[in-house]
Amino acid sequence: MSKCTTRLLIILAICIAQNASLSPTKVVLTQRTRDDRRNIQLVEFFTSVPNLQDFTVCYWLKSVNTTTRQSTFSYAAPNDPVAIATWIEPTIFGLQIRMAISGKEVYSVPYNIAYHHWYHLCHSWEGSSGRWLLYVDGELIGQGFDDTGRPLLIPGGGTVVFGQQQNNFDFSPDRPGGFQSSAVVEGEMTLMFFDSRPLRHDIQSLGASGNLKGEILGTKLTSDIEGNVWEINPESVDCFNQPLGDIVAWGVTQIELTGGTIMAQAKPSCGDF
């Protein structure tokens, strides 16, 4: 295998404002109740969410239990509590990575998530075409189109949570039905990213402008606008020098930890936090 294919990169074909050396921290969502049941745990980001036609959600995840649903990202808008949701779910066919918009499933892609192993996931949606992309560790593992009754505009002004599914907008931990402990991540997360623009992937050798931007496992990721790089090479020791999302930027956007979620120091090495 060539050197360029082992050095995994994701090139963002969206013009993000800046890169930053982000805080070398992670969140630990492994606390249990006194009778050893799963606890409701989450990370809420206090940010202003605009009306969304497109979006990209990315994060690093290490799970310690994939025998039940692991809700990695949840955006609840007024009158639309499942405006955007991503999760990992066990099925009789194995683990599936899934995404829903307005409560309707967009995709379900099989992928084996091993215990105690870090993975970098990116979910992208382009509302004008209904095109979706799913990357794991820099590899495009799924893509497609879904325009069956999808809203072209996801309402803004909602709440952003990682690590837990929201069942209500304007939640509180004491509100009945707001959360379910069966839909929480059990593990660790870091470098959460939420942006109002989609990723663009082109399997052609060159983009429309002829400007090559990068490679992902032998296919070309191209764009006719300037891109930024996410480094996910396990040998990298500068993993917290990452692009900033325009809605959520890890280490910049204010957060609140709920349900015993712990903020811990992280090593800067990609995939070995």
Image (cartoon, rainbow, N blue to C red):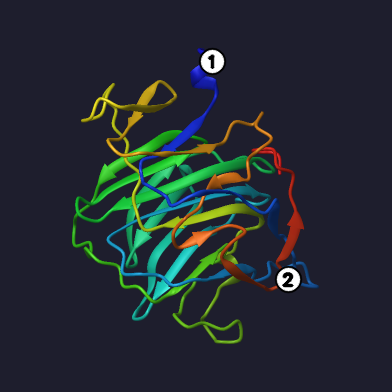
Label 1 crowd (10 A; few <14 / some 14-19 / many >=20): few
Along the horizontal axis of the image, is 98 left or right of 205?
right
Q: Secondary structure at mark 1?
A: helix
Q: Is residue 78 left or right of residue 144?
A: right
Amino acid carrying label 1: it is Lys
> Observer-nearest residue: 130 or 35?
130
Instruction: From the viewer's side, name the closer residue of 110 and 212.
Output: 212
- Compute the Cα span from label 2 to label 1: 42 Å
> Few, some or many C-alpha atoms within 10 Å of disc 2 (few <14, some 14-19, many ≥20)?
some
Closest to the camera, between mark 2 and mark 1, is: 1
Closer to the camera in the image, 194 or 175: 194
Q: Are marks 2 and 1 in contact (CB under 8 Å)?
A: no
Quarter holding residue 217: top left
N-terminal of the pair, mark 2 or mark 1, is: 1
Is residue 65 visible to us here?
yes
Q: Quadrant of the C terminus?
A: top right
Which of the 4 quarters of the picture holds residue 119?
top right
Residue 3 circle label: 1
Q: In the image, residue 53 lies at what x, y percent?
A: 27, 61
Q: State the residue at coordinates (60%, 50%).
A: 66
Kind of residue indicated by mark 2: Gly
Which residue carries the number 2 mark?
260
Residue 156 against residue 128 in the figure, above or below:
below
